[in-house]
Amino acid sequence: SSISRCPRAEDEEIGKIVSYAIESLQRTFLNGNRKMPPSATEIKAICSQSKIVCGVLTLDNNTTSFYIDSATTVQETIEEMVRKLGMKDPIGWSLFLTYNETTCKALREPERLVDILSKFRELKKTMTFATPEEEEMLAACFLFKKQFFFEPKQEVLDDVERNLLCYQAHQDLLTVRLPCLEEESR
């Protein structure tokens, strides 16, 4: 291809950008086809030979930040969150896309974060907002939480997991995603 014929000498700025772009493309091809075209943010990151900073929220209101590129998948993000949080058991933990405080969508493991963000930008273009401030307030957020599949008498031994599950149960009770009668809560 024409991109591979560009200069690759380390002392040439264009050569450095081309080398970085080829590495990014190779990683992207290894993870399968893209669903969305590259965004302006991705193109800027490749031209500046840098990665995109991404934050993932946990229900205890902490944010874990790390670098992503055009090929970073949901599965890679989950694995990185488990590693950064020092959790022992990653089973059942998922990444969700949330916006407007009520919409929460579980993400599939092979999906790319940049494709998800691009889809959200496209969705946002179709929405009607009363004010520019309202539009600015609507932002996508990646949320790390467990998909509940209760097994009777299964004890959670990991302190980090137990803490995050308590926050998640509390949040689900407040938003009525986990219904509970007043008598049951006592």
Image (spheres, rainbow, N blue to C red):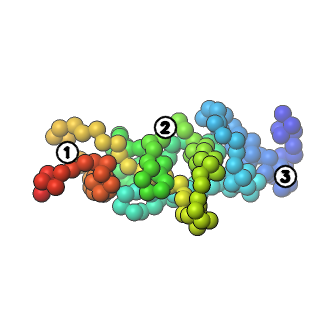
Q: Which residue is mark 3?
A: 14
| Tags 3 and 1 touching, CB below 8 Å | no
Q: Residue at x 48, y 37 (%)?
A: 108
Lower position in the chain sequence, tag 1 or tag 2: 2
Helix or strand or loop: what does disc 2 sit on?
A: loop
The residue carrying pointer 3 sits among few (fewer than 14), some (14 to 19) or many (20 or more) residues within 10 Å by Cα, namely some
Q: Quadrant of residue 105?
A: top left
Which residue type carries mark 2?
A: Glu
Q: Residue at x 69, y 49 (%)?
A: 39
Q: CA distance from mark 3 to mark 2?
A: 34 Å
Q: CA distance from mark 1 to mark 2?
A: 26 Å
Image spot of residue 91 (x, y percent): 35, 40
Lower position in the chain sequence, tag 3 or tag 2: 3
Q: Residue at x 58, y 62 (%)?
A: 130
Helix or strand or loop: what does disc 3 sit on?
A: helix
Is residue 79 shown to the viewer in this render? no
The furthest residue to the bottom: 133
Q: CA distance from mark 3 to mark 1?
A: 56 Å
